[in-house]
Image (cartoon, rainbow, N blue to C red):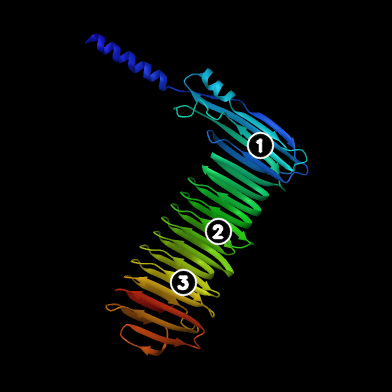
Amino acid sequence: MELRIILTIIFMLAVGSVRSQIGVEQAGNILVLDAAGISRLEINTPQNLKCDISVESQSETTVRVLYKKWARAKSSDQAERFEDLIEVKLDTGAEGSNIVRLRVLTPLKAPWEGTDYGAGIKLEIAAPQNIYIDSRSSFSDIKVTGPFRGLKIDNEYGLVEAEKISGESIVKTSYAEINLNELQGTVIVDAIYSQINANSLKITTGQGVFRTSYGTVDLSGITGSVDVSTSYGAISATDIDAGNGAVILRTSYGAINGENLKGEIVCETSYNPINLENVSLTHGLNRIETRYSPIQAAINTAGDSQLQINNTYDAINLTVDPHASAKYMLAVDEGGKIVTSGLTIKPLVLEKNRLIGIVGDGLSRIELNVDGIGEINLKGR
């Protein structure tokens, strides 16, 4: 019995010694390269290394890289061997190239892969303001702070942050949060399991595109057209002025909340509510639609645009300017109800489940439909 206890203790100590880890971090190393005449900085990191990348603009015409390697292993000697396998190169690539390349290299099958141990690197990069940042990595947190003239980030696992970019901003990632602030020009975000947050954007070329599948999207303070799509996340949009463009908000199974929206408005979801406040319709065919959840919308102006609101087995609650010139077409199924208040509608067709009426000259066209049992409440504020 005593022998069994002793053997058990020895085994536990042995396992503990294997699982224990020692962390080692190198002192900072610095690389500097003349970047006069350079138009692009390419950053490439390997798939088997955790990287923390920070890029900031500077007035000097150099690229400066401060990097620190770290490793966790069963001993300090092993951790140092891990670090020795990480190589950092800063060069201009092919002769005559106007590109600076920052490459982090590791063995194809690094010894920390598939173990409880690990290795990584911290990169602090300073680059000229007039260049384009192009980063490709897998396991990296990356933050880019401009001003820079453009940005492309292709990242799979890791936080992405970008600020003060003018020109083109393209972000592609899968499993990380995305935060964008003070961008101007083209903005395209293509993600899968990512939450997208964007603030203070000026979109001057095409539509700002924000796509994800299993994440929420939160936009605020944007000038220009936006096209937002997700499947299993909510969408929040505040202070969006698309002017003669469009504000398109689509999700399959998430709530949509919008406030201070201007442009052609499209909001579509299912099984979740839509809440819109202070909306100005400038033109086009505007559409708001959900199923089995209420729609609450407050429209300030409609001009000569068209608005169609559809719901299934739930209510449409619409507040409008009572004096706005509009033609209203309201319809519910058997068992539904139509209620109007606070505005004077001249009825053209008045039936139990249908109302067609006009205010003023009927400049805009507003159509409200409920399939199944549900209510339409139309109110002038």
* Residue 95 on image: x %, y %: 77, 38
Among numbered discs 3 and 1, the one appearing first in the sequence:
1
Q: Secondary structure at mark 1?
A: strand
Q: What residue lies at 41% left-to-right and 18% top-to-bottom?
A: 17
In which quadrant of the rendered view does residue 166 lie? bottom right
* Residue 281 on image: x %, y %: 52, 74
Among numbered discs 3 and 2, the one appearing first in the sequence:
2
- Rounded to the nearest angstrom, the CA distance separating label 3 from label 2 is 19 Å
In the rendering, which numbered label is found on residue 209? 2
Viewer-proximal residue among 259 and 107: 107
Task: Tell whether 40 sits left or right of 318.
Answer: right
Task: Tell whether 58 sits left or right of 196.
Answer: right
Among numbered discs 1 and 2, the one appearing first in the sequence:
1
In the rendering, which numbered label is found on residue 362? none
- Rounded to the nearest angstrom, the CA distance separating label 3 from label 1 is 47 Å
Q: Is residue 213 above or below residue 50?
A: below
Viewer-proximal residue among 216 and 46: 46
What amino acid is labelled 3 in the image?
Answer: Arg
Q: What residue lies at 45% left-to-right and 23% top-to-bottom?
A: 21
* Residue 70 on image: x %, y %: 55, 27
Q: Secondary structure at mark 3?
A: strand
Q: Secondary structure at mark 2?
A: strand
In contact (CB < 8 Å): disc 1 and disc 2: no
Quadrant that contains the N terminus = top left
Label 3 packing within 10 angstroms: few (<14), some (14-19), many (20+) = some
Q: Is residue 129 above or below residue 123?
A: below
Residue occupied by mark 3: 287
Q: Is residue 363 above or below residue 32?
A: below
- Rounded to the nearest angstrom, the CA distance separating label 1 from label 2 is 29 Å
Residue occupied by mark 1: 102
What amino acid is labelled 1 in the image?
Answer: Leu
Label 1 packing within 10 angstroms: few (<14), some (14-19), many (20+) = many
